[in-house]
Amino acid sequence: MKIISSGMASFFRNGATGFILLFFVITTGNPSPLNAQRPNIIFLLADDLGYGEIGCYGQQKIETPNIDQLAANGIRFTQFYSGSTVCGPARCSFMTGLHTGHTAIRGNKQFAPEGQTPLPDSVITIANWLQQNGYTTAAFGKWGLGFNQNSGDPNKKGFDRFYGYNCQSLAHDYFPMYLWDNHTKIDLSVNKQHDSVYSASLIHQQALDYIRKAGEKPFFLYLPYTLPHGDVIGPKDELYKYYVSKFNEAPLTGSQLKKREHTVTAEPLPHAQYAAMVGRLDRYVGEIVKLLEEKGLAKNTLIIFTSDNGPHRENGGDPDF
């Protein structure tokens, strides 16, 4: 799944080589309409979103009007391939442009004190490349390719600013005890499970603030949002209530409810909550596009929307539904 959008045309993708070639055109002197003014680049990476879970690929139960509009205005890719079936290797493949036969990360192996196997010092990422070619860079969401101060630290891999989860295992918890702002731990324990600290919302607000403060230099904004990865959990907001009404789902009870270490509470209506999670992601896409238009950046911004790999069955996920 992939959509690309230049000047509000939009790309869907799952892989890295074509994206690397696109960056080569942008950052070198080769003749190209893009070189007249280097575009801002926003790369939206959903987490475990199946291609069949959005409207422009045939979904009829979950409404995704903003993502569908990206597809309508841009380019929709129907034969695109993910770097891997799981988070770390897929993200490593994207960041390096290498397939998993050549990448340093080939599994989701844990690494002390927090996180997974880091990118080695020798690895140059797309963000490093763009940073060296005059782009300001930021990442908001789930990194999973190294922890603070080790070789895979996002600040060492091309990002001026990082906010979110260093560890993808901790990212299963949408009401976490903390998030990272570069090397500063942001304590969220006081208001645990309150809607105001729903991590997906906090991360998205940071992304919007970054766009609002964008200066004259072109920017590369990497948005590896955690939605809609398990655990299936979220606020009981208007989206959730809409899908509760729409699906008329029988609530899970007793042993049907699944809990895991990082989950605050099990979700008795997982279909409704999962649909709301996808709906929140779609709403975030719409808010990004609207803000770009308000700031006059839309015509010179390349938006790429994809997922790291296919749908999940973790703690409420149900692709068959």
Image (cartoon, rainbow, N blue to C red):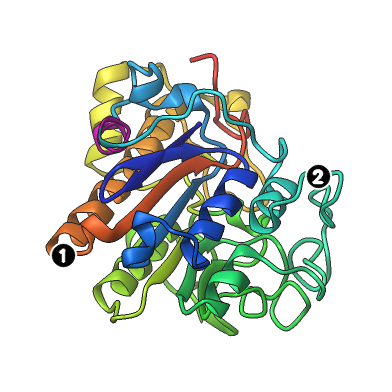
The residue carrying mark 2 is 100
Residue type highlighted by circle 2: Thr
Query: Is 201 situated left or right of 213 in this image?
Result: right
- The residue positioned farthest toward the front in the image shown: 31
Residue 272, visible in the rendered structure:
yes
Decide which of tag 2 and tag 1 comes sooner along the chain.
Answer: 2
Residue 166 x, y percent position in the rendering: 64, 67
Given residues 66 and 63, the one toward you in this image is: 66
The correct choice, above or below, for 132 with respect to 32 in the image is: below
Residue 57 x, y percent position in the rendering: 40, 21
| Residue shown at 46% from the left, 54% from the top | 43
Membership of 67 in magenta stretch: yes
| Residue shown at 83% from the left, 48% from the top | 106
Residue numbers of the magenta segment: 64-72
The residue carrying mark 1 is 296
Residue 233, visible in the rendered structure:
no
| Residue shown at 13% from the left, 62% from the top | 294
Given residues 299 and 157, the one toward you in this image is: 299
Residue 139 x, y percent position in the rendering: 50, 67
Query: Is 299 situated left or right of 253 in this image?
Result: left
Membership of 113 in magenta stretch: no
Q: Main secondary structure of the magenta part?
A: helix
